[in-house]
Image (spheres, rainbow, N blue to C red):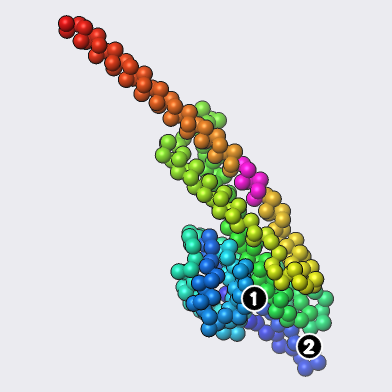
Amino acid sequence: MSSLQSASPSPDEPSSRILKLDSIHLGKEIDLEACARVFVDRLFHATKSELSLRLGEGRVYLFPFGSVVFVGVDRAQAEVLLHELAPHVEMPASEKVVDDYLIEIQPGVREQVGFDRVLLGEEDPLKVQVVASVLAQSTTLEHFENMSEDLLQKASSVTDGMASGGRIVLTLKQMIRFIGVALSARREIVSRLSIMDAPEMAWEDRAVDKLFHDLKSNFELSTRFRSLEYKLRLIHESVEVIVNLTNTRRSEILELTIIGLIALEIVLALLGAFKS
């Protein structure tokens, strides 16, 4: 993470600056209310869907869906805050997804959204905030994409075993574990569908709303989300198949147990009759 970078303008040119944004997905959820109390001395702005803090010369944006965005904050300061945030993160991610983006400010220039940066004609706090919001959405979406891909690979190992040898490669305990993990992950993803919502500041300002939709298109959030929904359906179908197979296996085990008990009872009866 790097601090705010400033260009060196000539005396005849308006100043230009570059802000670097670093986004990290920390876990399932960040407790914004607790953070507002703990970091009250650094609190800049707070709503139910977002919390912003002052940190040195920069800003930090916290989102309830588990992501944090640093704007113009150096690495050392960011690492300290991440350590302080840890107690307020529910179910920390085992592998943190990170991403970065730039805001280039050139007075008087036409606003433009690009692959690695957005060009702004002025340093508008609301526009900086909406860029941070979209970057956080993208980072969280990538976390869910990784999660769904991992679940699909596990489901494929089961179906590939069935296709190649007509057998289930997982034990009953492993299947039950997979079902539990898949259902839990699907529930978490569905409960976080609000990450696709427009931030509050976009509802009240047409220019901010336009920037939000331009950024959303640039990060391909809608396309990626549709792909995620498709993967979720595949996971759900795989889970249904595995549940049915699990129930079938249990029924077969139960039937074999009953047959075994009946056979044992017959053998014992025959032995008794033979002895008499």
Chain part drawn in magenta? 228-234
Q: Which residue is mark 1?
A: 20
Mark 1 secondary-structure assignment? strand
For the point 49% across and 47% down, the residue is 181
**Residue at the location (55% across, 82% down)?**
42
Image side of residue 61 versus residue 86, left or right: right
Q: Image point 60% across, 57% down: which residue?
A: 192
Q: Amino acid at mark 1?
A: Lys
Where is mark 2, residue-wise? 14
Q: Is residue 231 magenta?
A: yes
Residue 67 image point, x, y percent: 58, 66
Tell me which corner region of the image, top left, top right, bottom left or bottom right, holds residue 237: top right
- In depth, the one of 10 and 206 nearer the eye is 206
Q: 99 or 269: nearer the eye?
A: 269
Residue shown at the point (43%, 25%) measured from the top left? 252
- Report the Cα–Cα distance between label 1 and label 2: 20 Å
Q: Earlier in the sequence, mark 1 or mark 2?
A: 2
Q: Is residue 110 visible?
A: yes
With respect to residue 22, does 95 lie above or below? above
Q: What label sits on residue 261 in the rendered view?
A: none
Residue 165: in magenta span = no
- Amino acid carrying label 2: it is Pro
Nearer the observer, 185 or 275: 275
Q: Residues within 10 Å of mark 1 (few under 14, many from 20)?
A: many
Looking at the picture, tell me which residue is in the foreground, 130 or 254.
254
